[in-house]
Image (spheres, rainbow, N blue to C red):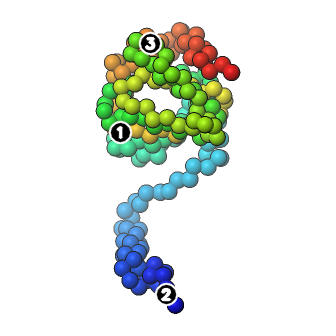
């Protein structure tokens, strides 16, 4: 009868597993701060949505990356329908952006540099389209189409605030009195 070398500790695979286990145990003794596994649960999504409801910007993120200068940014973003994300682009060729809707309905608007809507896409967790990968240089915005919407976002770090040439020149700045009407016009692209 043959035995599985991974279970018996014999053979090359067993030795590799044993060494890995030893390294993990040693790292724990040194207090090396091994990464913590985080489960993305429905209760986490609900709690984050509740925080977004009470936030002045009507959105709330939960970062999985340890700090702003980390090379890979991964985060959850809960967003409410009256939250405004100014159309913008990322000029850094390493900052393509991936978005996956985990809860609710998320509208994604892609613009030409001349303020023409190139595409409007609805992302839903169980729908035909649940995510999008947006190349650097493409103007885009997102908006919640229903309360409690949460999406996962990934892009390269480090965090750098948007430069003026990355903000869409035709769109109102966050906090401007024109935001309400502009956001309503974007939401109109998704009227059922």
Q: Which residue is drawn at the image coordinates 37% and 68% (left, top)?
A: 27
- Whole-angstrom CA distance, mark 3 to mark 1, is 27 Å
Secondary structure of the residue carrying numbered label 1: loop
Residue that mark 3 sits on: 115
- Whole-angstrom CA distance, mark 2 to mark 1, is 48 Å
- Whole-angstrom CA distance, mark 2 to mark 3, is 67 Å
Q: Earlier in the sequence, mark 2 or mark 1?
A: 2
Q: Which residue is drawn at the image coordinates 58% and 33% (left, top)?
A: 123
Q: Which of 109 and 77 is in front in this view?
A: 109
x then y, percent, for residue 170: 43, 10
Q: Residue furthest right?
A: 192
Q: Is residue 101 left or right of residue 7?
A: right
Front of the two marks 2 and 3? 2
Residue that mark 2 sits on: 2
x then y, percent, for residue 25: 41, 72
Secondary structure of the residue carrying numbered label 3: loop
Front of the two marks 3 and 1? 3
Image quadrant occupied by the C terminus: top right
Query: Are the residues tagged 3 and 1 within 8 Å (C-beta)?
Result: no
Residue that mark 1 sits on: 157
Residue 62 vertical position relative to residue 85 in the rendered view, above or below = below
Residue 139 vertical position relative to residue 74 in the rendered view, above or below = above
Q: How many marks?
A: 3
- Categorize mark 2 by other alpha carbons within 10 Å: few (<14), some (14-19), many (20+): few
């Amino acid at each position: 009868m043959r035995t599985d070398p991974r279970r018996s500790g014999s053979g090359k695979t067993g030795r590799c597993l044993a060494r890995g286990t030893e390294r993990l145990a040693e790292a724990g003794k040194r207090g090396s701060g091994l990464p913590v596994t985080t489960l993305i649960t429905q209760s986490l999504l609900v709690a984050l949505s509740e925080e977004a409801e009470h936030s002045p910007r009507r959105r709330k993120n939960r970062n999985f990356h340890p700090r702003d200068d980390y090379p890979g940014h991964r985060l959850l973003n809960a967003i409410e329908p009256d939250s405004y994300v100014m159309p913008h682009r990322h000029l850094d060729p390493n900052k393509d952006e991936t978005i996956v809707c985990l809860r609710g309905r998320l509208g994604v608007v892609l613009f030409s540099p001349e303020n023409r809507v190139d595409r409007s896409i609805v992302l839903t967790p169980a729908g035909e389209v649940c995510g999008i990968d947006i190349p650097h240089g493409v103007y885009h915005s997102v908006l919640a189409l229903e309360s409690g919407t949460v999406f996962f976002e990934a892009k390269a770090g480090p965090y750098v605030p948007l430069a003026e040439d990355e903000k869409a020149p035709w769109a109102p700045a966050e906090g401007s009195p024109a935001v309400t009407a502009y956001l309503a016009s974007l939401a109109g692209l998704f009227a059922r």
